[in-house]
Image (cartoon, coloured by chain):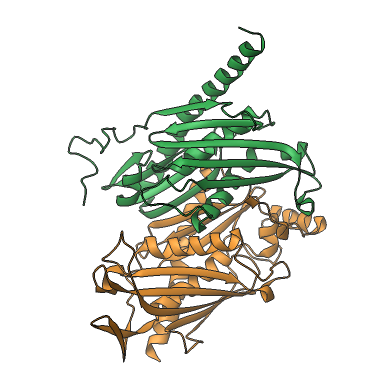
Amino acid sequence: MSAEERKHEFVDSIRREQVFRTLETGVRLDGRKMDEYRKIKIEVGPIVKADGSALVQIGNTKALVGVKVLVGTPFPDTPDEGILTVNADILPIASPYEEPGPPDESTIELSRVVDRGIRESHMVDMESLVLEKGKKVYSVFVDVTVLDVDGNLFDAVSYAAVVALATTKYRKATLKGDQVVFSEKRVPLKPKTIPSSVTTAKIGRALVVDPDWVEEAVMDARLTLTFNSNNELCAMQKGGTFGFTPEEILKQMEVARAKAKENRAILKEAIEGAKKK
Amino acid sequence: MTQLISKKNLRLDGRKLDELRPIKLTVGVLKNADGSAYIEWGRNKIMAGVYGPKECHPKHMALPDRALLKCRYHMAPFSVDDRKPPQPSRREIELSKIIREALSPAIVLEDFPRTAIEVYVEVLQSDGSSRIASITAASAALADAGIPMRDLVVGCAVGKVQDKIVADVSDTEDKEGQVDLPVAFMPNLNLITLLQSDGALTKDEFEKAFKLALEKGRYVYEIVRDALLEGFVGRKNEKEGN
């Protein structure tokens, strides 16, 4: 059953006051502008045992993604498509409020929102992942490990997943009767578009992008928007226990659209840089 | 692929592009729950029940300054084409969370510190836009329970089907259409409390769809208000032996 979690309760009322008071003067507690991201650092391919991987840092938030491409049976309702699975895990070392055990509802939401952004942008050409229609398809596992939590997991995990997928090279499989044979030859998982996710938060009257942990702890509501390479909206999720006015939604949409473009350039640079190596 | 919209701009079930399916809402349908509501929205059949404010279990979850809102969205195994295993799926866990977050700003939780308010949504038959029908029924059930509220939460799922913007997305339109965009909001406070989307939308398409969702949601609000009024009058008559 879903209930409010205590992990966001532990912010001093003094700190809460401070966040609000600074925002009223037009800057944020860490000195950023309202529409400014923290530094985004991307390392491509740190895990050589994975078919594709990326470590993304947004400020202190660290997310590591490894992609493994296996062969499996397609879902009955999509016999002519491969399988894409996004699964996130926030490690107990990532925050004092995380514990070992099955994923809680926030972690499940995180997996599903990142999954939706990638799936609905049609980044992965699912139809190219079929070995034999209705019988055998490639199954792409995007496994996310969050190592350090300092807010905005949605974007950090999304960027790591997108870069890892865009640089994935998987072993080509062939079917010999019922046997699946993997060749040593690797083929790239060519991305059809680069989805770019932007998370905004409403704190009192202020609207900010890329909320850090303190901002998330005091925010009223959150909006995560994902745009495809044409900069069209392809997925969206509101979170948090308060609401937005329609004007706020439309305003954030345009701020996010511009930011998505900027951040996509950073993702593309990392992807292109890795190809040259 | 199925032709979802005819040349005359009619949808599979004969609706116009901006037409909602029939909605039937009744409150006070369960004896034991403190508040309840049953909604039929097209072929969606959803029962919502509310317990509380009551003692919070486990106690360590109680909040010192307000009630703890708990919410469970659950689908019956027979509610969809395939059998849905009874244990909560990842989708149901996510929906439980976003439905809770959609309802929470409407409830005056700070009136009941250290207690819990439980909202149960049971989808008996699902037919597209079930999260919006669930929120509508749940907010009616909360009002039926007499829990102080700032506003009702209502909504409408809009979408894009064959490049056209439509209101109240059906199951087939959700599966075979391009975009599903559920919106829930508090009409009097003008605050959006649930917003999701999947599928590509241009700026103009989004603005058109969003506006349509708010307009249709206001119509749903009238239905909920009428149902609450009817429930109240019905109970008053019962009490007075009429």
The orange-tinted chain is A
- Taking depth in this image into account, of B209 and B162 the one nearest to the observer is B162
Q: Is residue B154 visible?
A: no
Image height of A264 relative to A70, above or below? above
Query: Which color was chain B given?
Result: green
Residue located 47% across and 50% down the image = B196
Q: On screen, A205 above or below A110?
A: above
Between A269 and A277, the one lying in front of the other is A277
Residue placed most toward the observer, A223 or B203? A223
Q: Quadrant of residue B52?
A: top right
Q: Position of residue A203 (x, y in %)?
A: 66, 52
| Residue found at the far top of this picture | B242
Residue at horizontal 38 percent and vertical 86 percent from the top: A275
Q: Is residue A146 left or right of residue B176?
A: right
Position of B83 with respect to B12 (left or right) is: right
Give the residue displayed 65% in from the left and 50% down from the top. A220
Query: Quadrant location of residue A40?
Result: bottom right
Q: Position of residue B13 (x, y in %)?
A: 27, 35
